[in-house]
Structure formats: C-alpha cells, structure tokens
Amino acid sequence: MLTNSHDWPQEGNFLDEQGNVIKPENVEDYNRHMPYVDKGDRMANSYSVNCRIWKWMKMWKIITITCLMRIRVTKWLTVTQLAVGYGSG
C-alpha cells in the first residue's frame, strides 16, 4: 500500500505479546476511513445514473416536441402556399 502521509513501518516483529498481528498505521487508517468513501461512492453512483437518465429523458422530450412542431409548421406553410397559389391563378 502506497502512502505519503504515514511513516514507514519499522523493521522487526509485527506480533504483540499475545501473538496478534500488529497492523501498520496506514492500514489502520485506511480501514477506519474507507467505509465512508465506499458509502459515498455508492451514493454518488446511484445518483449520477438517475440524474443522467432524467437529463436525457428531458432532452429527448424537447427534441421530439421540437420536431413535431416543425412538421406541423412546415405542413401549415405548405398548405397555405398551395392555397394561395391556387387562388391567385
């Protein structure tokens, strides 16, 4: 594990008097703070997916409405020009 905020572990035995493993300070610090980071990552990932889906749904709705309105206006202009053209003839 790479770190620049902790001292290098001292050489020697990493067992205490009862035979339990002594964890280096950087490992204990990592284990102490990682649950918060993991929880934050999970929350951020679940939010960002929903946010992106909602954003694209809104975008597609705007695009669809814009296209439908352009079709209606084009149709109206075409019918109006044809009616004017036939009436003036």
Image (cartoon, grey):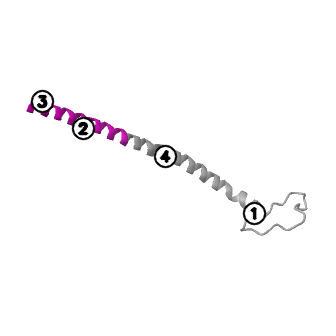
Q: Which mark is residue 73?
A: 2
Q: Residues within 10 Å of mark 3 (few under 14, many from 20)?
A: few
Magenta span covers which residues? 62-89
Q: Which mark is residue 86?
A: 3
- In percent of the image, x 75 and y 63: which residue is there? 26
Q: Earlier in the sequence, mark 4 or mark 3?
A: 4
Tell me which corner region of the image, top left, top right, bottom left or bottom right, holds residue 86: top left
- Kind of residue at badge 3: Tyr
Q: Report how far apart the C-alphas of labels 2 and 4 lie in the structure.
A: 32 Å
Label 4 SS: helix
Q: Position of residue 60 (x, y in %)?
A: 40, 41
Q: Earlier in the sequence, mark 1 or mark 4?
A: 1
Q: Is residue 44 magenta?
A: no
User: Which residue corresponds to mark 4?
Assistant: 52
Q: Earlier in the sequence, mark 3 or mark 1?
A: 1
User: Which residue corresponds to mark 1?
Assistant: 26
- Kind of residue at badge 2: Val
- Kind of residue at badge 1: Asn
- In percent of the image, x 17 and y 35: which residue is there? 81
Quadrant location of the C terminus?
A: top left
Q: Report how far apart the C-alphas of labels 2 and 3 lie in the structure.
A: 20 Å
Q: Are marks 2 and 1 in contact (CB under 8 Å)?
A: no
Q: Position of residue 61 (x, y in %)?
A: 38, 40
Q: Earlier in the sequence, mark 2 or mark 3?
A: 2
- In percent of the image, x 72 and y 62: which residue is there? 29
Q: Earlier in the sequence, mark 2 or mark 1?
A: 1
Q: Position of residue 41 (x, y in %)?
A: 60, 52
Q: Residues within 10 Å of mark 1 (few under 14, many from 20)?
A: some
In-front residue for pair 12/77: 77
Q: Position of residue 51 (x, y in %)?
A: 48, 47
Q: Earlier in the sequence, mark 2 or mark 4?
A: 4
